[in-house]
Structures are given as C-alpha cells and as structure tokens.
Amino acid sequence: MQLETYISDLLYRYECVTIPGFGAFLTQKASASIDAATHTFYPPKKTVSFNEQIQKNDGLLAHYIADIEKIPFEVANEKIANRVKLLKSNLTQGETVSFKNIGEIIFNSEGKIIFEPTYHLNYLTNAFGLSQFVSPSVSREVYKQEVEAIEKVIPLTITPEKRKASPYFKYAAVALIALALGALVPSKYYLDQIEQHNQIAQEVATQKLDSKIQQATFNLNPLPAITLNVAKQSGNYHVVAGAFRVEDNCAQILSDLKAQGFNARSIGVNKYGLHEVVYGSYETAEEALKVLRNVRNNHNEDAWLLVKDLDLVN
C-alpha cells in the first residue's frame, strides 16, 4: 500500500490528514516570500508540519483508501494499522522514515519525533504552475544624494540658450536684440519681452531640476581680468554667473569671481531654492548687455541676463 501517495493526495484538499495511532500531517498557507541573500522569489504555498499528539481516527484516510482500492472501510483501517506498526518499529531501531514528497521522520535522543518537511510539491492549488525564480538585485540611483557632490565640483548654471529647439527661445533672442538696439529707456513692448524672457528661463530651470540636475560648464581657469565698468551695484539688469543649491558653493564661486576682478555679488535665493550669483547689476539694459557679451566671450559662455527688481522682492 502506497500510504505516502494517499496522504499526499489528501494534503491538496485538507489541512489535516491523520494516520490513526501515529500522528497527523498539518498544512498551513504561507504568503509569497523573498530571500534577500540569494535574491530568490518564492510563490505562496502550503507549509507541512507533523503533530504526533493527534492520533484519533477521523476516518478520512481510511475512507479514501477504501474508495481508491475498492475495499471495505474496516480492511482499509487494518492496512493502516499494519503500516503504523512497521513505521514505529523502524523508528525505534533508529531508522529514518521517509514519506515521499512530504518529509522525513526520525526519533531524537529523547525519543521525540522530529519531522523535516520537503518542498518537492506545493500543496496550495491556487499556486499551481508557479515556481521559484532568481532575479538580480536592483540598483537604484538616488539623485538627491548626488546633488551636493556634483555641485562641489561643477556649479549648476541655468542656461536657457541650450534649448534651441524650443519656439520660446526665439522670443527671448528678440528681447535681447531689441534691448541692445533700443534707447536708454525701453518701451513697454521691450519690457514685456524681457519679462517673457525671465519666465522662459525659470521654466527651463524647473524642468532641469525635476528630471536631473545637469552639470554645467563653468570653467574658472585663471584668465586675465576683464576691465568692466561695474562701479554701480544697483539696477534691475543682472548678469548671472550661476545658481547653486548649496550655499557654501555659492560663497566659494563668489570669492573666486571677486579674486578675478569682478564686482560680483549674491542676489539671494530664487523661488526654486537656488542661490544666485551675478557678475554685477546695472541700471540700463545697454550696459548689462555690453558686460554680458564680454563675459560670454572671455569667461563664461553660459552666463545669462536676468531682469528683476530686487527692491520689490526684498
């Protein structure tokens, strides 16, 4: 009699299968799990255990054997009893009793039954067809943690000129050309264009910060100091050197620019939380554009013009 096969069949459908006079095999549902050390994913399953305290005959196993072998219920019980005697004899002699696809049973030094389950079969029918698999570990990039390290080497500069494909860039270019050719007091039309230029520049900065902070080309190689008329440190026209998330980086760049002869200063924090450093601030657009051309040609091609009333902001 293949007792193991009958027990295995019943474990798919029942949570307790008792061998009268010997003990009971119990199943319990377990959720899917992950072994972090081996990166192995295990499907949900039924775990199998053994309880030698449950020995009362509930008729389940005997009825199943009688139905399969087409024998009377009493004969099935007698077959089970004979098999139990053999199992106990083997255990008493120190042998290991194996139940195929279920587990192994032995006696320990104290005469207690020890059950070691095997996992060749998953008795959870809802998990039929699912098997374990190994997946390589996932490496995640935490950009927020990399920002400060990037800015210590290369500062972040907002450069709307790089978005040449954007149709809005044309309007910003028109505004700059109009300022250069216009009179000392710009018309309302030019002021509207400047305001639009500022808005476009801030949108570019937002998109860059949302995706990933890009490294900008900000070369502070020692060059001959440029003679600029930067006596005035007021006005609404500012030639921007860069914007920095870390305030210490802002202070370092400011110090370097002053050492190279620029009358640089910090104009505070913008609405994106970046500390802005400018080469200087000027009363007229003509003066600011003149400085901007010199800076781009000789020092920093990514410098740009910001039109902003600092008195209103403060």
Image (tube, rainbow, N blue to C red):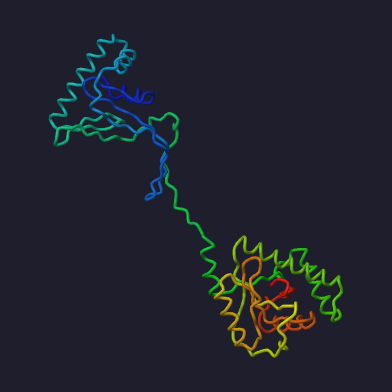
Query: Closer to the camera, 17 or 67?
Result: 17
Q: Position of residue 209 (x, y in %)?
A: 62, 63
The N terminus sits in image quarter:
top left
Query: Closer to the camera, 230 or 124?
Result: 230
Q: Residue furthest left?
A: 93
Q: Position of residue 85 (x, y in %)?
A: 17, 21
Which quadrant of the figure has residue 227?
bottom right
Q: Position of residue 206 (x, y in %)?
A: 66, 63
- Identify the residue at image location x=69%, y=65%: 204
Query: Closer to the camera, 63 or 6?
Result: 63
Q: Is residue 307 left or right of residue 152?
A: right
Q: Is residue 253 above or below residue 70?
A: below
Q: Is residue 222 above or below residue 268?
A: below
Q: Position of residue 140 (x, y in %)?
A: 50, 57
Which quadrant of the figure has residue 231?
bottom right
- Identify the residue at image location x=70%, y=71%: 313
- Identify the residue at image location x=73%, y=89%: 229
Which quadrant of the figure has residue 101?
top left
- Identify the residue at image location x=51%, y=64%: 145
The C terminus sits in image quarter:
bottom right
> How many numbered discs, if any?
0
